[in-house]
Amino acid sequence: MLIFDFDGVLVDTVDEMAVSTFNTVTDNLATTTDELPGNSSALFRTNRYHIQTAGDGVALMGWCLAQAHRAPDHQMTKTEYETQRDGAPGSRHDRAMRFFEVRKTFIDHDTDRWRALNAPYQPLWDQLLTRGDSIIILTHKNREAVVNLCHHYGLMILPKQVYSGDTGASKIENLLSIQKNLGREEFTFVDDNVENLKELNAHFNHENPVIRLLLATWGYIGPDDKAEAGRNGFSVVSQTEVIEMLVESP
């Protein structure tokens, strides 16, 4: 059974996250990327692959605003990113909870503009539309936002199909819940963040491998992520390959 991450795997959400992290950092209520200063929005997209959680995104936007004069394709080094993340105000959890609050304010203020900042990945999305009742999503995103976007774009999942980061739960904790709720241990998980895959691998596959871990090449991956995935034994997959898995699965 396949389990999917959301941001960068099912939906390109980077513009919405850029706007919402900007609002979180500045206490503004921007609704488009055009309202962000300089190259801050483009820098956020360029460096999105570094982050794992919503709290990390808030830290990254702080850097993007300070460096908005840089070329839009300027990439942070891993060390620069970790320094920015670890030195950002507040805890990772607190930043994430504040981000979710700000995102809800945006949705309540102008749902249409919020949705317009997100776009499903094709052709994978159309394949999922035929299997909505069997899709499981494992994400750091908040559940309300995931369900809202899925329904808007025709994927009529139920809230119980989304294992989310609303309460600050980690992907390890949520995957343990999936195993318990579905009564099985073995799954295949598709994510675009190699650090997420490494954490899951260390927890679930340290004795007997039970979780097959796949790196999505169409998401927010960094220049070294494919090689890092290979070193850790993770398969690197395209949308076409994932669609083939869906077609073959019961």
Image (cartoon, helix red, strand yellow):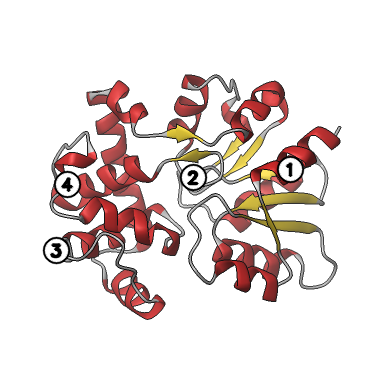
| In contact (CB < 8 Å): disc 3 and disc 1 | no
- Considering the numbered disc 1 on the image, is that residue within a helix, a strand or a loop? strand
> In the displayed structure, would residue 213 be above or below residue 139?
below
Residue at mark 3 to residue at mark 4: CA–CA distance: 12 Å
Q: Earlier in the sequence, mark 2 or mark 4?
A: 2
Q: Residues within 10 Å of mark 4 (few under 14, many from 20)?
A: some
Q: Depth check: give the residue in front, 23 or 96.
A: 23
Task: Identify the residue under disc 3.
Answer: 69
- Considering the numbered disc 3 on the image, is that residue within a helix, a strand or a loop? loop
Q: Earlier in the sequence, mark 1 or mark 2?
A: 1
Give the label on residue 231, or none. Answer: none
Q: Amino acid at mark 3?
A: His
Task: Identify the residue under disc 1.
Answer: 2
Task: Identify the residue under disc 4.
Answer: 36
Residue at mark 2 to residue at mark 4: CA–CA distance: 21 Å
> In the displayed structure, would residue 229 be above or below residue 243?
below
Q: Earlier in the sequence, mark 3 or mark 1?
A: 1
Mark 3 vs mark 1, foreground winner is 3
| In contact (CB < 8 Å): disc 4 and disc 1 | no
Q: Earlier in the sequence, mark 4 or mark 1?
A: 1
* Residue 205, position as x, y percentages in the image: 77, 67
Q: Quadrant of the C terminus?
A: top right
Whether residue 52 is visible, yes or no, is yes
Q: Depth check: give the residue in front, 73 or 51.
A: 73
